[in-house]
Structures are given as structure tokens and as C-alpha cells.
Image (spheres, rainbow, N blue to C red):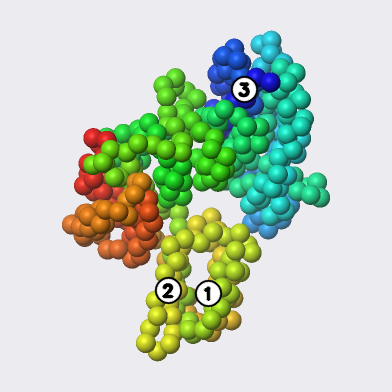
Amino acid sequence: MKPILVQKYGGTSVASIERLHNVADRVIKAVKEGYAVVVVTSAQGDTTDELFEKARSILPDPKSAKREYDALMATGEKISIALLAMVLISRGHDAISYTGSQAGILTDSKYTKARILDVDTRKLRYDLAEGRVIVAAGFQGVDRDGWTTTLGRGGSDITASALACALDAVRCEIFSDVDGFYTADPRWVPDAIKLDALSYDEALELTHLGAGITHPRAVELARQHNIEIHIGSSFKEQAGTVIKSEVPVEAERHIRGVTCRTDEVKISVLEVPDQPGIAAKLFGSLAQARISVDMVIQNMSRRGINDITFTVSKADYSEAKPIVDSAAAEMKAKTVDYDEDIAKVSIVGGGIADFPEVAAQMFSALGEHSINIKMISSSEVKLSCVIAEADAKTAVQALHQVFNLSNS
């Protein structure tokens, strides 16, 4: 068997027949270099958004019919894989398209947010051994009952990483319309610099904290199996960003990037009785709905009551609110406060916790711009602050400047 290479192409990369031929150029080049190639594609262009709008014209909340929602949303990728396989065939290469279920991607039954349980690679390996290029649908799988499931936003990256791991690929290449990770969003910081390499931990934090270049679960899978991920643009030839186990960092350069998320809601459950199991009741209910919680802070007052504050994604807000309201009532909390006008600005860098001056610099920079900090969270490789959404751009620019990231 030739060494296996997994490539993933985003929706803009396959949005037209011309762009499908551009993708085919890259695939054929990899074949000529001696690789057995698996290509994972997203739905073409705005197909997913168009499908959602059609569903919303029937149901105001399409996700309320989750099984049918997944069945509909999975159709977009089926179009792109068939078309790309046809393009490759038209150019003299043996290619075959696979849906998620045909590719052996087994998931749990959490529709719209399914997680991959296993990948049966037998059919894939047979076709690769026969010299075929496999074109697999991203974003989707099948549960044990045979129903179609989807992996959530960014799910095609998860598919590509999972297949690379299951097939022991030499690497996973993720192509879209961006050419890698930058020290900050170039739309906000024009002099931001592209990062040539990141460690798995750094990439995980950057993706969790708003970099938006790839999906955190894709990075996590690659880290577990030590598979390199190469991030690049399908419209450019130059190298992008490599994500791998170890990346040397200059001693004087602790910070790798500044990120910002404006797609979160701050939720404060106020005056909760201080009793064992209270927090578990609240967060257990959210976990059952597969709603991720971030930046949890619990403050204890002298009267034996607590305030619990945390953030969730705005995409999960409509589903999270009734769950939190119900749990708060059961916990006999006084009230629940929801703040949608927030941003989470973060700095990321390996070993950042070992340098206390970094936190002081961050807080000083925000203070000098009269930016009030609402919440703080830290780890070994990141420091995050929740601030008002109106201050987001100013905060990112100030932090990028104070840490001199344009000269990285």
C-alpha cells in the first residue's frame, strides 16, 4: 500500500466546476507524488445555508426535527463528492465517492452534534489498494440504527482528521480560503503575521478561542494519534501552518496569537444555595444536551449562597436558556442574568503560565484603553478575558501591539 494522504476541501474550494478542477489538480499532483489519496469535501459554497433556509420556511426552528434536519443537511456533501469524483474520472483517474455511512463512519445518535465512535476502514483500504482516489463526504456519519447524523459546524475537518487517524495517514491537509493561522485576525490587525507552525496545545486553544481556522475536535484527534495537520489555502501554492507535537519557541516570544470570540453569551445564575451537587445538577443538564460550557466561575457569599457564571455559544443559546431557567428554578436561585453583548479576548502561547508578567501586561493594556474585564480564565497556554463586545476590536489591536506580535 502506498502512503496515505488525506486532504479536506472547504465549501468555497468546491463551489463551482472550475474550482472542482482546481481541487482535482491538487489531488492529481499528490497521486503523481506517490500517495494513495482520500479527499474529504464540504458542501459547495452556500449550499448548507440554502438548505437551512428551505427548512426554516417549513419549521421556524428546523433543529426541532433533528433527525430530518440531519438527513437534509447531509445532502449537500453528497452533491460535491459525486461531482468531484466525476471531474477526476473525466481526467483519466479512477475515483469513487463515499457518503459518511459508506466510509464506515459510525457515530452516536446525538443528531446535529454527533460524535464519531469508530471508523471501519475495510472498504476504504480496498479501494485505495486498487489505486482509486476516494472522495468522502465530510460532516456526516451514521448511527447504530442506520440513521444519518451530522457532526456540527466544522464537521468536515473532524471527518478528515478521523479518517487520517483511522487510516494511519502520513498527514492530514486541510484546505479552505484561508492560508493558515495568524497572530490575529488580519481583518482587524492588518500587520498580523502568519504562523508557520503550532503545537497541538496551541492550535487547540486558538481554535477553541475563536481563530476559526479548523475545528478543535479535528486537532484533538490528530494529537491523540500524532498525525500532523497542514492548514493551507486551496487558492495559493505557498505553505500554510503545520500543527504538530513539538514546536520550538524563542525564549523571548511567549505569545503566539491573540484571538477573539463574539459568539458567546454570559450566563449568571444568582444567589444559589450553597449545597453539594448544585453545580452538577445545572451542568449535567447542559451536558446531556451536548451544550459546551466555558469559563465557569463560582463566587461564594458570606450568607451561604453562591453566584455561578459561565459562557455558552450563541448557537446553543436558544436550547440552553430553557435548560438553565428550569435548573435555576429547581435550585431555588434568585434569578438568571443573560448578557449577549460580550466578547472573549484571549492570548495564547506555550508555557504562558510560567511568566506572570504576561498577565500584568494584558490587564494593563486593556486598562489603558478603559476596557472593563468581566471574567478571567487561564490555563498553561492561554489567558482569556470577557469584555464588552463593543470593545473587542480595540482589545485585540491593543494586545497585538503590546506583545509586539507583528515582529514574530
Q: Nearer the viewer, residue 117 or 317?
A: 117
CA distance for labels 1 and 2: 9 Å
Q: Residue tagged by mark 2?
A: 298
Q: For the residue marked with disc 2, what is the amino acid?
A: Gln
Residue beneath disc 3: 3
Which of the numbered marks, if any, corresponds to residue 92?
none
Secondary structure of residue under mark 1: helix
- The kind of secondary structure element at disc 3 is loop
- The residue under label 1 is which amino acid type? Ala
Q: What residue lies at 60% left-to-right and 63% top-to-bottom?
A: 287
Comes first in the chain, label 1 or label 2? 1
Residue most extreme to the top: 92
Neighbourhood count class around disc 3 (C-alpha, 10 Å): few under 14, some 14–19, many 20 upward: few
The local secondary structure at tag 2 comes to strand
Q: Which residue is mark 1?
A: 279
The front one of 139 and 303 is 303
Q: Are marks 3 and 1 in contact (CB under 8 Å)?
A: no
Are the residues flagged by discs 1 and 2 in contact, CB closer than 8 Å? yes
